[in-house]
Image (cartoon, grey):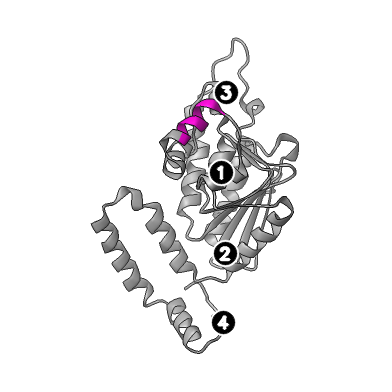
Amino acid sequence: MAFETIQFSMETGAARLTLHRPDRLNSFTVRMHEEIAEALTQIEADATVRTMIITGAGRGFCAGQDLSDRAVTPGAEAPDLGESVEKRYNPLIRRLIALPMPVVASVNGVAAGAGASLAFAADICLAAKSAKFIMSFANIGLVPDSGSSWALPRLAGQARALGLALTGEPLPAETAADWGLIWKCVDDDKLAEETDALAAKFASAPTRGLAETKKLIRGAFTRTLQEQLDLERDRMRELGRSEDYREGVDAFLNKRKPSFKGR
């Protein structure tokens, strides 16, 4: 597939996906969903990829759904938005969460609607100080989708989640960081540098361990402490037999930099 709405590359262990409709603040269309799905398929099939970066072109990260792509015209049958969520947005979020590697969102500008949901679905979210997060669904009579109704109360608490979802007020990146919605807020001119540093770190990291850590933490809310303790035991047993653990211990004991293979 030739990419028209995204830019995509895989090199030195890192996949980089840039939403590329800058004239429309990188808002989603059916075509963009299809291209992102193809990019994810390539990532899933390539064992050398050990981290994924998502960012946006131009002055925005992602403004959510491009409403002109499914406009409601007078007298026409209303679109089935549930079908759109089921076929496009839900699979996207599920695939990102299931990727066996860290997913980093580098939020360079406004992240609204499903664009904000996309950022919150990443394992690590970095944002420029000028960026803003907007739960814009309330402004057009809809509910938060793409997992944000699940993520927001867990990340920020019920009171703040309701405030964001019901008012649609923009949330500055610095406040999002203070509330624990994102990992870090950085100066605009440092965002690319910080993102590249994270990509390099994860691309040379013990990927299996990071993948299992991701699964443990993401599933913790659905388990009891006893269940979580048992899973920690099982994962430690498994990872203690991995090549990366042997390499990490040997490097530590011999005071050298480890060379992890992600195995």
Image quadrant where residue 237 sits: bottom left
- Tell me which residue sits at (56%, 66%) in the image: 202
Dots 4 and 2: beta carbons under 8 Å? no
Which of pointers 4 and 2 lies earlier in the amino acid sequence? 2
Dots 1 and 2: beta carbons under 8 Å? no
Q: Nearer the viewer, mark 3 or mark 2?
A: 3
* Mark 3 surroundings: few (<14), some (14-19) or many (≥20) residues within 10 A: few
**132, 87: nearer the viewer:** 132
Q: Residue 170's spot in the image, x, y percent? A: 61, 33
Residue denoted by label 3: 139
Which of pointers 1 and 4 lies earlier in the amino acid sequence? 1
Query: Label 1 amino acid?
Result: Ala
Query: Label 3 amino acid?
Result: Asn
Give the vertical position of 201 relative to 189 (above or below): below
Q: Secondary structure at mark 2?
A: loop
Q: Is residue 119 visible?
A: no
Q: Nearer the viewer, mark 1 or mark 4?
A: 1
Q: Residue 37's spot in the image, x, y percent? A: 56, 47
- Left or right of 85: which side holds 172? right
Residue denoted by label 2: 49
- State the separation of the CA atoms marked 4 and 2: 21 Å
